[in-house]
Image: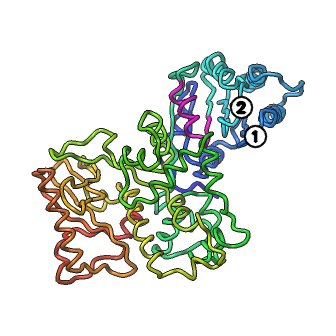
């Protein structure tokens, strides 16, 4: 299968490959997002050395995997006793390849797996780069791992032997709606865009999950098969996901479970209170790690003077669709193998699809800006909470432009043209009024509707001068 999307990532990797100097590249991102596939599709036939660590493997298993990889490129000696010895063997084998004058590509996948307790792997790996790789202009070392926190702490932001040694880092994000559509088409799946949107709301843009969809599936049958059937392929995936990312996954799962219960998101203080974590550096570290794995996003709020608050004042919201679906429908799974098919159209599912659509829009800010034709205008996007009104008014998404205009976004999921009714129109006008009064903004305020198909013309539809549809999110 050809690479779908990843245009920017491919161009950057090709440029680094042609740089003419030693390169040390670290790729990171959540499990199943396609890091390995990207490297192998680009460089598979050029890899001088390629090894993949075993998730949750023992020290003996990791050493055996590495030894077998050494033997694939010509090593015939005894098993190594230390990681320093292993990398010395690798240096000697690679030196022979360098003598041919070709670029020498080394790819170590799931790098964190090799760092078992007291094994000395990181020190030996650092010596491999600092003592040998950096001295050879034809070496290109690529490492990646799903354990994002380990990658950032030990490689990207290392304070030890690899401090400032990375030449490039790359965060591999999930697919957008458009890339998801392209991926499904490449697998022979021709769905309408509402179906793709619904699937995206459940699986997100995770290539591995999307690869499990079959050409004869509907959205409902796919969800039933993947989550509710007796041999459901994604049963247990939630726990595997967090174990692969974090050595101690419990606090992360607790934070995700807490955030999933909040439609509007929560501040750090609110998360600390709900989870009973002490509000210290640890919770900031947990939240930062979750953000780097695309599980959450922090929206900065503004105070009454219109100034952006510090990160502690930001609102954290779930951004991982698979996690949202799991917490809404799979924590107490149904025994009905056709649960999703049998509950389509119910208030529970419809409400959830509406909430998920808000997150889809938040994930496609660039597409929204393009639809508004403001790509070339500087923008900030953030959320806002009223301090004075009761009930507290909240706007999930505002786009503030450098030309002194602010879009206040209303996101509405509908399987037909959306019809704005009197009660909802009054609520929107109230939110706009509260924001204008409390923020003291002097910017022009433009209400923006983001919906699936469009706005039905009626008595109250004139509130929205700008409407963005699902089609434009696929842009």
Residue 63 picture location, percent across and down: 79, 32
Q: Hey, which quadrant is residue 425 in on the image?
A: bottom left
Rendered view: 416 above or below 321: below
**Label 1, residues with CA under 10 Å away: few <14, some 14-19, many ≥20:** some
Q: Is residue 387 left or right of residue 149?
A: left
> What residue did someone put label 2 on?
116
The span picked out in magenta is 143-158
> What residue did someone put label 1 on?
57
> In percent of the image, x 65 and y 65: which residue is there?
212
Residue 176 picture location, percent across and down: 46, 58
Location of the C terminus by quadrant is: bottom left
Sequence-wise, which precedes: disc 1 or disc 2?
A: 1
Circles 1 and 2: CB atoms closer than 8 Å: yes
- What SS does tag 2 mark? loop
Q: Is residue 203 left or right of residue 235?
A: left
The reply to whether the magenta stretch includes residue 356 is no
Q: Which mark is residue 124?
A: none
**Label 2, residues with CA under 10 Å away: few <14, some 14-19, many ≥20:** some
- What SS does tag 1 mark? loop
Looking at the picture, tell me which residue is in the foreground, 242 or 446: 242
């Amino acid at each position: 299968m050809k690479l779908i999307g990843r245009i920017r990532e491919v161009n950057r990797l090709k440029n680094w490959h042609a740089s003419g100097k030693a390169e040390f590249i670290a790729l990171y991102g959540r499990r199943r997002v396609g890091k390995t596939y990207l490297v192998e599709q680009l460089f598979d036939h050029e890899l001088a050395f390629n090894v993949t660590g075993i998730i949750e493997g023992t020290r003996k298993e990791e050493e055996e995997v590495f030894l077998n990889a050494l033997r694939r490129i010509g090593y015939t000696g005894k098993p190594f006793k230390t990681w320093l010895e292993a990398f010395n063997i690798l240096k000697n084998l690679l030196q022979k390849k360098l003598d041919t004058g070709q670029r020498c590509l080394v790819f170590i996948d799931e790098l964190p797996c090799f760092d078992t307790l007291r094994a000395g792997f990181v020190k030996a790996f650092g010596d491999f780069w600092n003592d040998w790789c950096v001295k050879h202009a034809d070496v290109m070392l690529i490492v990646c791992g799903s354990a994002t926190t380990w990658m950032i702490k030990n490689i990207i932001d290392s304070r030890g032997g690899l401090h400032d040694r990375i030449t490039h880092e790359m965060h591999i994000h999930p697919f957008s709606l458009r890339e998801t559509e392209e991926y499904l088409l490449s697998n022979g799946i021709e769905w309408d865009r509402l179906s793709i949107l619904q699937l995206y709301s459940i699986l997100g843009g995770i290539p591995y999950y999307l690869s499990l969809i079959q050409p004869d599936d509907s959205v409902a049958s796919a969800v039933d098969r993947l989550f509710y059937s007796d041999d459901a392929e994604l049963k247990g995936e939630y726990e595997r996901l967090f174990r692969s990312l974090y050595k101690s996954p419990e606090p992360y799962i607790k934070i995700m479970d807490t955030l999933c219960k909040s439609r509007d998101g929560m501040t750090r203080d609110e998360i600390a209170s709900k989870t009973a974590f002490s509000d210290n550096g640890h919770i900031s570290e947990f939240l930062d790690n979750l953000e780097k794995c695309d599980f959450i996003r922090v929206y900065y709020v503004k105070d009454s003077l219109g100034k952006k608050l510090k990160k502690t004042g930001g609102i954290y919201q779930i951004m991982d669709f698979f996690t949202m679906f799991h917490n809404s429908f799979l924590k107490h799974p149904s025994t009905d193998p056709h649960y999703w098919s049998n509950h389509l159209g119910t208030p529970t599912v419809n409400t959830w699809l509406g909430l998920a659509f808000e997150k889809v829009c938040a994930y496609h800010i660039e597409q929204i800006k393009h639809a508004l034709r403001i790509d070339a205008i500087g923008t900030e996007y953030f959320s806002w909470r009223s301090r004075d009104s009761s009930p507290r008014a909240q706007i999930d998404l505002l786009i503030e432009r450098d030309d002194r205009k602010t879009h206040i976004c209303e996101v509405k999921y509908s399987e037909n043209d959306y019809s704005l009714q009197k009660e909802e129109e009054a609520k929107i006008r109230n939110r706009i009024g509260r924001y204008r009064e409390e923020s003291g903004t002097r910017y022009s305020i433009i209400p923006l509707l983001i919906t699936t198909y469009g706005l039905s013309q009626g008595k109250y539809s004139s509130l929205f001068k700008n409407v963005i549809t699902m089609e434009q999110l696929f842009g």
